[in-house]
Amino acid sequence: MNKKKLPLLKPHTVDVKKGKKYAWCSCGLSSKQPYCDGSHSETKFKPVVFTVKVSETVYLCGCKHTKKSPFCDGSHKLL
C-alpha cells in the first residue's frame, strides 16, 4: 500500500502530557487513531514519534495530509 487512508476529515483533539513520547499514525490504518498500532508494517509509511514539552491540548491531523506532521494544518479542508 502506497496511498494513505483517510480515517477522519478533521483533527483529533487530544490532551498530551509533558515529557511523554507519542507515535502518530501517518498511514491512516491504525485502529487506535490518531496513534500508531503497527498497522503500517506492510506499507512505506512510518509513524511520527514526538515528545511534548508542555502538557496541553493539541490537534493531531486526522486526514494524514498535513505538512506539519503530526499536527493539523487545515489540509483536510482541501480534500
Image (cartoon, helix red, strand yellow):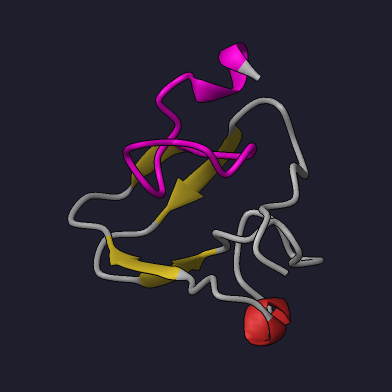
Q: Is residue 8 above or below residue 36?
A: above
Q: Is residue 28 above or below residue 63?
A: below
The residue at the point 66 percent across, 20 percent down is 79
Q: Is residue 23 left or right of residue 3?
A: left
Q: Position of residue 35 (x, y in %)?
A: 60, 64
In front here: 60 or 78? 78
Q: Is residue 27 above or below residue 42?
A: above
User: Where residue 27 sits in the image (x, y, percent)?
Assistant: 63, 61
- Magenta-drawn stretch contains 62: yes
44 within the magenta span:
no
Q: Position of residue 32 (x, y in %)?
A: 74, 65
Farthest residue, direction left? 53
Left/right of residue 23 with respect to residue 42 in the rendered view: left
Residue 8 appears anywhere in the view: yes
Picture residue at 60% right of the left edge, 12% below the top: 77
Q: In terms of depth relative to the viewer, which is nearer, 36 or 2?
A: 2
Is 53 in front, or is 40?
40
Q: Residue furthest front?
A: 2
In the image, taking residue 73 as reference, residue 45 lies left or right, namely right
| Residue drawn at (63%, 37%) of the image | 63
Q: Is residue 38 visible?
A: no
Q: Which residues are magenta?
A: 59-78
Q: Looking at the rendering, in which quadrant would you find the N terminus? A: bottom right
Along the line of sight, the residue nearer the viewer: 47 or 1: 1
Q: In the rendered view, would you say 13 is above or below 64? A: above
Residue 55, how many percent across, how many down? 31, 49
